[in-house]
Amino acid sequence: MQINFTHHQSAHCENGVVSNLMKHHGFNVSEPMVFGIGSGLLFCYIPFLKVNHAPAISYRAMPGFIFKRFAKRVGIKIEREKFKDPKKAKARLDENLQKNNPVGLQVGVYNLVYFPDEYRFHFNAHNLVVYGKEEDKYLISDPVMETVTTLTENQLEKVRFAKGALPPKGHIYYPTDFPKELDLERAIVKGIKHTCKDMLAPIPIIGVKGIRYTAKQIRKWPIKLGTKKANHYLGQIVRMQEEIGTGGGGFRYIFAAFLQESSKVLNNPKLAELSKEMTQIGDLWRDFAVDASRIYKNRGAKADGYNDVAKQLETIADKEEVFFKALKKAI
Amino acid sequence: MKKSEVPQDKSNLESANLRELCYAVDENGEYTTAHTTGWDPKTIALNNAIEEINQRVEEAKNRVLNYQTSPIEYYMELHKMDLPILASYVGLWKWRVKRHFKPKVFNKLSNKLLQKYADVFEISIDQLKNIEHAN
């Protein structure tokens, strides 16, 4: 049994699943549109929460939030369910496939066999679409993969019931109800306003302030932690910024693409200008990654290097502060 | 980033025949997507992270051989886990798992409990008790 589902590759899994499911139901919504309306852009540094033995850092909203906000803002309804019993989770999945309904699943990455070994970490907020079943193999459309793939019943159960932080618990979701036409204009305005509010939040570890705070920490790392740990921490920042899923520059390019598309939808030329600015800020993030990687490549690097990259982050923070204030006014 | 500047460096993605999607600007300033085979700065970051894990595994192994910790900690590192992740996989409190790191405590564990760990690591109890049998 196979549902007639078209796979489109995307940069990020959550946007990709939403965009692909929307396209399947006849609404042509791009990945940047989903990301922007769902207010996906964020910066968050949580020093006391350790991931892979380094402080947690995120360039995007909490997993699941993008879809939730997107659905609310464009007026679609989603059915979601989590399970204790893997058998029930499987039954619900099969039921939907019988009804020709492709569904989104939250899964853990560690046991995803089609990922390269190096990418298999204990990260539980990956998303994919199941669009059919042939014998005991589920047909999988994983948005970050170039083509579709398959998983056996056992393999799928394992990733659906991965443990650790944010366990998926068999989380299944699919849109059930659509408006006649999507009200993109209002949704875009809401999405942008929310992102501006997040990035300018008066909380020390979030948004522009969070970037400055991170810069301050980076300056302290080599002295406080020694070079080895400082490099490991710095490497984690670069990985979160550029690893599978951000589309480059810690989601800044996807956001710029969203602003460009929105400027046409809203007929607002100011947004096109701001899109160009965001692209330049994205380039600065890329430069930061290049220089940071130089530090942890040459292990004997001097403390100066850390100050340099910290300074780069501070420049980015200043630019983003101006940017999001301007964006708030433009909408 | 311009479309023509999207990096095409060698990376670990190649082994899986995978290319990532990037967002970039074309000649007319319009946003579009482009494939990338990898980018050196992040390949270096990833390789460093993997090296770090390998070191942790090696250190844990040495400590097991010196009777400073139990094989559970070794297998935990081998599976890229930390204490909270392992505890949630075996369904025990963190402090209990940590206690099982003590060789003395580990040696007295019931087969039922050992089987729990063995199942998580997908090995036999024999392999769990003796890390030399693992590889």
Image (cartoon, coloured by chain):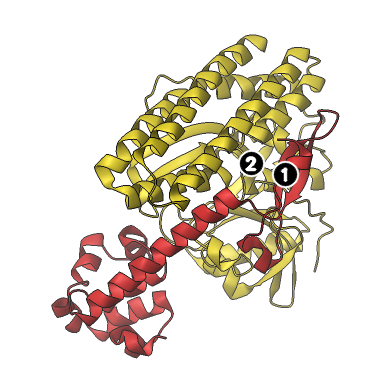
For label 1, the residue is B6
Chain name for mark 2 = A
Along the line of sight, which residue is nearer the eye, A294 or A96? A294
- The reply to whether callout 2 and callout 1 are in contact (CB within 8 Å) is yes
Q: What residue type is labelled 1?
A: Val
Q: The yellow chain is which one?
A: A
Q: What residue type is labelled 2?
A: Gly
Mark 1 surroundings: few (<14), some (14-19) or many (≥20) residues within 10 A: many
Q: The red chain is which one?
A: B
Residue A284, x across and y down, in percent: 58, 31
Q: How far apart are marks 2 and 1 (CA)?
A: 9 Å
For label 2, the residue is A248
Left or right side of B36 for A265: right
Place residue A324 in its image quadrant.
top right
- Quarter of the rendering occupied by the N terminus of chain A: bottom right
Q: Examine the rendered structure and indicate whether residue A232 appears above or below residue A113.
A: above
